[in-house]
Amino acid sequence: MFVAESKAASVSVKQGELNGIISKLAHHGYEGMIHSMIRAACSIAGVDASQLDRESVLVGRRYIYDESGRLLMGDVFFHGDSFFILDETKGKLRATEVRHCAATSALDAFCQAVTTASKVVIDGRRLRGMSLDWIEEKPDFGAFDRMYGPPRKVDPLESIPPDYTEEEADKYVALIDDDNRNLLITLAQARGKALSVDADSEARGKGVPQLLSSGIIRREYLVKCRKDQHLIVSIDDRDQLDAGVGDIFHCATCGRLFREEIVEQIYVLSEFGRRLLSGSRWMMIWITELLRRFGLVAEQIRWSGSAGDDEIDIMTDLQGTKVFFELKDRDFDLGDAYPFAFRVARYGGDWGIIVTTGRVAAEVKSFLKESPREFGNVRFETIEGGKSIPSQLPDVLMKISEFNIRRLVYPITEYTGFNLAPYVNAWMKRVGEAYKGKHPSLIGRTA
Ligand SMILES: [Zn+2]
């Protein structure tokens, strides 16, 4: 996944000074792409680059305005495994780094180079009144949207932080296996009635040791009368049957000790298992754990976004992009797709991701691909088939982050009239391949 990070220093510059800083940065190994092109063009034309009004070469279709007026023309620097954007906004110099989430940040080194270049370029007396402390700020992903008018009106959602125990985070994995889950569903439906797993198919039985050791199911012993087969009692503890109550109490019908009667071993769903299974809670935990493994921090993830009867299972904020997840422990059909698509649009989601352990119906895919007009610019992705979810999810997150990065650089394209997208796309392809399968280490965990 690609991430962006920004820092700003309260350095107010004019375009000429910014040009000077960008030129000086080349001495530190940061070659400004746009300014280098202008220099090369001047050289070919036999023109002195310093005499050229650089802004006059801009053919931006639309200038970007913010509260303080027009942005100055900054530049883009591809360097190592990152690229940087240096621009000026609201009287501040702003440095933004784009990198893979598993790459080490190189933003401070870039800021340091800008500081050094600024000290050379900006007049000392002017510089004394400014601060060259680089303070973290949110990257401006919103500039792209602001170019397309006022923000969308969306209905608010109540939500909660991910809420599960350490034990649940350790044990939910036993439910990823379809056979295990089917067994649990059967047990849940059998509620109180005897169900012998041993007598069942081998495929079903293979997960029993894992489910037992995870505390998701437990053993129970049914004591039945040898004379008329009626159920006398069920006992949790084998030892109690052999040496405790089983050795003390007699059957009222035939007079045998409990331990001498027919003893059937069965499996029952524990309260812990029932909780994991209910409302596909295990899936909420699974997807949350995966999102965190693939680079999201706990604060970016919310559960159960709700308004009235509407609910969104998991919501994340990927650098200003709202991603809504719909989880289904079964096939996903058109009847599921309509309400979900509607909810994503209504509550301001930018992407709707359907995650299912079953299949997503073909008509759902074509419905979402056509992206009906009433759903605005919402994009949809589907992830289907239980076990392959962990391999598909990073690809989807990658796709969303690439979209975000394109959004981040798009204003420069609009401003300069120079399309950066092909370069940024090619860079993301190269770096994405180099870092394929690499994710930031999991730090901390929601209690
Ligand atoms: Zn009996």
Image (cartoon, rainbow, N blue to C red):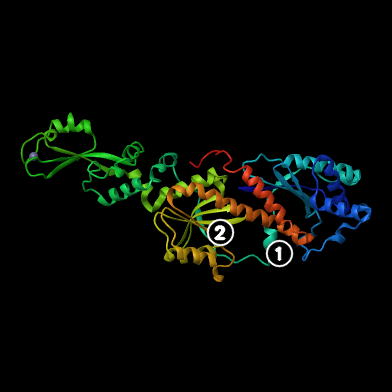
Q: Identify which amino acid the numbered label 2 is placed on.
A: Trp
Number of other residues with Cα within 10 Å of mark 2, as a class: few under 14, some 14 to 19, many 20 or more: many
Position of residue 239 in the picture relative to residue 391 (left or right): left
Res 437 seen here: yes
Reading the chain from its start, which is encountered first: label 1 or label 2?
A: 1
Instruction: Estimate the x, y position of residue 244 in percent, counting from the top left.
Output: 18, 30
Task: Tell which of 275 and 50 is nearer to you.
Answer: 50
Residue depicted at x 63% and y 42%:
434
Residue depicted at x 39% and y 53%:
279
Q: Which residue is mark 2?
A: 351
Q: Which residue is mark 1?
A: 147
Position of residue 210 in the picture relative to residue 315 (left or right): left
Residue depicted at x 66% and y 47%:
430
Q: Check mark 1 vs ligand 1: CB closer than 8 Å? yes or no.
A: no
Instruction: Estimate the x, y position of residue 342 in percent, counting from the top left.
Output: 50, 66
- The residues bearing labels 1 and 2 have C-alpha atoms spaced at a distance of 20 Å
- The vertical placement of 53 against 283, above or below, is below
